[in-house]
Image: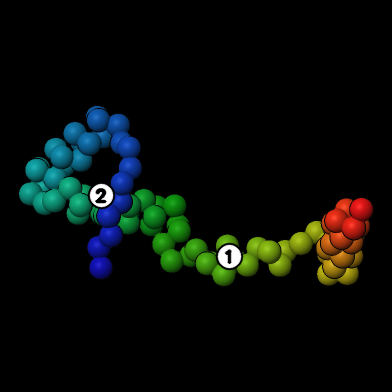
Amino acid sequence: MDKILSARIDEEIIQKISLIASELKTTKKKVIETAIQEYAEKIGKNGKIDVLEMTLGAWNRDETAEETINSIKSAFKRTMVRHQE
């Protein structure tokens, strides 16, 4: 399924995309898709993006679970004391 992408692009780049599309007798969409695929292959990221590593970063903490729990409990206690005064 195709999705719509909106981006501000330099006018010169848009003209280049149009020229390439007309020269290759294809669509601007196809030119952009091909360019992105080739760029991804060039930098070696084609299929190598680990989504879980990107989204589960919350588990990579500098503190232990006990330290996290203690800081949460102390923050909760401070707010409770503030509301009791």
Crowd class of label 1 (few under 14; some 14 to 19; many from 20; radius 10 Å): few
**Residue at x 87%, y 65% (from the top left corner):** 73
Kind of element beneath mark 2:
helix
Q: Nearer the viewer, mark 2 or mark 1?
A: 1
Q: What residue type is disc 1 on?
A: Thr
Residue 32: mark in rendering: 2
- Outermost residue, front direction? 85
Q: Are marks 2 and 1 in contact (CB under 8 Å)?
A: no
**Residue at x 9%, y 43% (from the top left corner):** 22
Residue 42 x/y as whole percent: 39, 52
Q: Dividing the picture into quarters, in which one does residue 80 lie?
A: bottom right
Identify residue for label 1. Answer: 55
Residue 38: mark in rendering: none
**Residue at x 28%, y 60% (from the top left corner):** 3
Q: CA distance from mark 2 to mark 1?
A: 27 Å
Q: Dividing the picture into quarters, in which one does residue 81 lie?
A: bottom right
Q: Nearer the viewer, residue 13 or 7?
A: 7
Residue 16 x/y as whole percent: 20, 36
Q: Nearer the viewer, residue 62 or 84?
A: 84
Q: What residue type is disc 2 on?
A: Ile
What is the quadrant of the N terminus in the image?
Answer: bottom left
